[in-house]
Image (cartoon, rainbow, N blue to C red):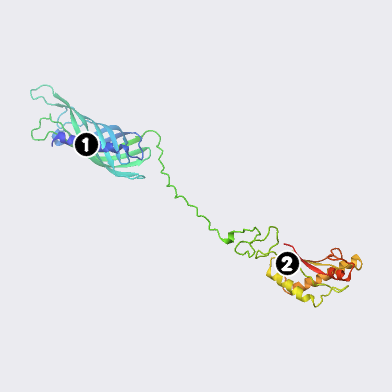
Amino acid sequence: MNKKLLCCALVGALGLAQTAMAQDDLDDRWYVSGTVGYGLFDNDRSVSNDMFWGFGVGKFISERWSVDLQLDHANPNQKGTQLNWSLYSASLVSRYHFRDAGDNWWPYFAIGAGVQRHEDEYPNAAGGGPLDRRGNDLLAQVGAGLQADYGRTALRAEAGLRYDFDDTAGRPDRDDYFSDVYVGLTAMVKLGPEPVRAVTPAPAPDPVVPVAPVVTCADLDDDGDGVNNCDDKCPNSQAGQTVGPDGCPVPVTIDLRGVNFDFDKSSLRPDAVAILSEAVSILQKYPELRVEVAGHTDSIGTDAYNQGLSERRARAVYDYLTSNGIDASRLVGPNGYGENRPIDTNDTSEGRARNRRTELNVQN
């Protein structure tokens, strides 16, 4: 395998991870890590499989990419000798995590590159003490694993291959690298307070376009008489006039002229029935009208007598109205006013006859 091409590929992969730094992340705190693992070393190294350990520092640079700087050390035994053999490595490892926001555990794959230093002793063919072989070589690794997140702490289990481009080992039967298998367990502790998550504001609702109310004649009262234009049959009534439900003026006093009484009598005369029937029709046409039933006398007789006589005359009209369908709740009275409200002179018989009367006085 051409080690230069492999290293270029690894560096290119790390560059792809760096391009993700502009993206939003879930938790970008730095963390420190400690690793213990087991190495299955290349048979050509002539060393036994053994434990390794390491520590590192890293962070997520996006929601799915993390980068770690790792330092590792292994010190296995050389097979069949008591000679020293050690490996030290420093590597930059990028991991792509198959995770979504809210996941507590997920798989990932790893790719990295770095430098590995070997320090080993080997027998002296000329005799005497062992010889030393020391040097620094390029390192590449690929792997896969599972990570579990617990808030401030996290665990990572990983397995993979490491390629040590050591070309000074003097092995004519092999290429110029060793391939070692590793499995490891890493514990991570995040530093600093938990970051504040950005909250995406809810989209603003569409503006409500006010709908102009539809104005109809039922909403208008041009002459201000309290009757809308649809129902107003007299649209030019004057301010202050008493109007009926149709908007037309109604008399303040319903004329009962002709409903007069014989001297010293309170009974209705036959000629008064037609006039009262017309008054009933008016009240039926305007069901909202309320009227006072008032009775009057001439000046003949004492005040007390005339007061009672006027009340009896008002009662006669009141009873006629209620017996002909006018509800008593629309009537005020019957009230008698005696001789106190004459409409003509009491010095003539004709004037006194006109004063002996009843009236319907509109109250609204």
Labelled disc at residue 12:
1
Residue at the image point whose x is 21% and y is 36% from the top: 10
- Give residue 292's position: percent from left, percent from top: 77, 65
- Give residue 329's position: percent from left, percent from top: 73, 67
Q: Amino acid at mark 1?
A: Gly
Quarter of the image holding residue 178? Answer: top left
Q: Secondary structure beneath disc 1?
A: helix
Q: Nearer the viewer, mark 1 or mark 2?
A: 2
Quarter of the image holding residue 93? Answer: top left
Decide which of 339, 51 is in the foreground and name it: 339
Decide which of 273, 1 is in the foreground and name it: 273
What residue is shown with label 2? 330
Extreme bottom residue here? 270
Decide which of 125, 248 is in the foreground and name it: 248
- Give residue 221's position: percent from left, percent from top: 62, 59
Labelled disc at residue 123:
none
Q: Amino acid at mark 2?
A: Arg
The answer for how far apart the CA atoms under marks 1 and 2 are is 101 Å
Q: Is residue 244 left or right of residue 317?
A: left
User: In the rendered view, would you say 200 is above or below 327?
Assistant: above
Q: Is residue 313 left or right of residue 204?
A: right
- Give residue 266's position: percent from left, percent from top: 84, 73
User: In the rendered view, would you say 230 is above or below 19?
Assistant: below
Density class for disc 1 (Cα within 10 Å; few <14, some 14-19, many ≥20) is few
Residue at the image point whose x is 73% and y is 73% from the top: 278
Decide which of 351, 340 is in the foreground and name it: 351
Density class for disc 2 (Cα within 10 Å; few <14, some 14-19, many ≥20) is some
Extreme top residue here? 128
Quadrant (top left/top right/bottom left/bottom right) for the C terminus = bottom right
Q: Secondary structure beneath disc 2?
A: helix
Q: Earlier in the sequence, mark 1 or mark 2?
A: 1
